[in-house]
Amino acid sequence: MLEVSPLLNIAKVFIPLTIAFLVGLAMTPSLTDYLYRNKMWKKKNVPKAMDGGTAALSAALHNDEERKTPRMGGIVVWGSVLLTTLLFWFFAALFPESAATKFSFLSRNQTWLPLFSFLAAALVGLLDDLLQVQERGAGVGGGLAAWKRIGAVLLIGLVGALWFYYKLDVSTVAIPFAQAIDLGIFFIPFFMVVMLGLFSGGVIDGLDGLSGGIFATMFAAYAGIAFAQQQIDIAAFCAVLVGGILSFLWYNIPPARFFLSETGTLALTVVLAVIAFLTDAVLVLIVIAFPLWLASGSSIIQMLSKKFRNGKKVFLIAPIHHHFQALGWPATKVVMRFWVVSIITSVTGMIIAIVGKL
């Protein structure tokens, strides 16, 4: 029979997950009503590739203006996470002598930094989304210019890196089944590069249901890693992220009611980087976040191939999930197969991180 403490820890992880899911479901009807009423979708298609050239296939597949599907569905994710976190913190503060204190997971040493990074990135993404639907800004089709989004990610990454290096006195990176390496001051740029790399994986948000399923499995994997390391507050926070993502996914399954868009993808990729460093399991991101690397890597390969091979392409269209779609695969088949891949890579990465420290 399990002792009380492990049972309490399990409850501390799964109860907030359930609450976050329910909060997300509850807030979605009002949000979707607002988004549809105010026509929060792209008003016209922009058939441009990453290199500035034409992208006819992309224009055919990305038809937001015809579907009239709003952006900013990521508000459901970060809204439910924020409300759930504050709810448990509020009850713990209101009843300091009760069991409520045991369920609050907002702590200075484990969850302040990821929550701050998550919300800061969400607000930057929200600004970009608002500019896009209003057809304002320097980006292609509106929105923030690419260098401004990259700059925002690097700035958040710098704040996070400085917090780790100076406040938490962290400069090492764990290597599974081997000794950790001390990067010294180079830990700071390494942290920023990892965050930027994950941000590039935000292009995974391209098909109904795709990004939600993948992000949920990745954060579930890090919840498992944190739990195994007795970082229960981080595990609970990851679980709340999963709950918020699943509530979004409930409405994003085809046909999607809204898209995750920049306010969701930017926030989730940034906080994934922070959690990976907090759990000292950043190198297993290579495995856990494999679908993100695959999506961003295929886009980079396509762009370089067109530049240095006289316009020749490696894929029919990038990112790679659209390549399969262009081959004739139904979107649902692409999504579900990517979900399967994500589950396998997330579980594999979690096992490597846990066993690699034994």
Image: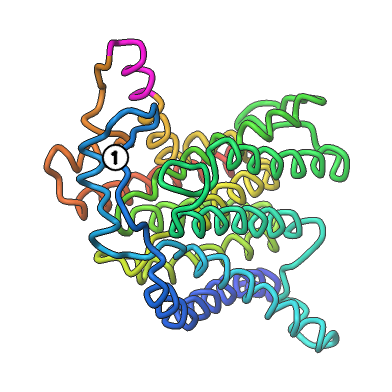
Viewer-nearest residue: 71 or 187 = 71
Q: Secondary structure at mark 1?
A: loop
Q: Is residue 189 above or below residue 158?
A: above
Residue 186 lies left or right of residue 206; in this view the side is: right
Q: Main secondary structure of the magenta part?
A: helix
The answer to whether 319 appears left or right of 289 in the picture is left
Q: Quadrant of the N terminus?
A: bottom right
Q: Residue at point 19% right, 43% down?
A: 325
Asked which quadrant contains residue 5, the reply is bottom right
User: Can the viewer see residue 220 in this picture?
Assistant: no
Query: Is any atom of residue 277 visible in this view?
Result: yes
Location of mark 1 (residue): 47
**Mark 1 crowdedness (10 Å alpha carbons): few <14, some 14-19, many ≥20:** some
Q: Which residues are magenta?
A: 301-310
- Taking the image as shown, residue 356 lies to the left or right of residue 73, namely right
Q: Position of residue 28 (x, y in %)?
A: 44, 78
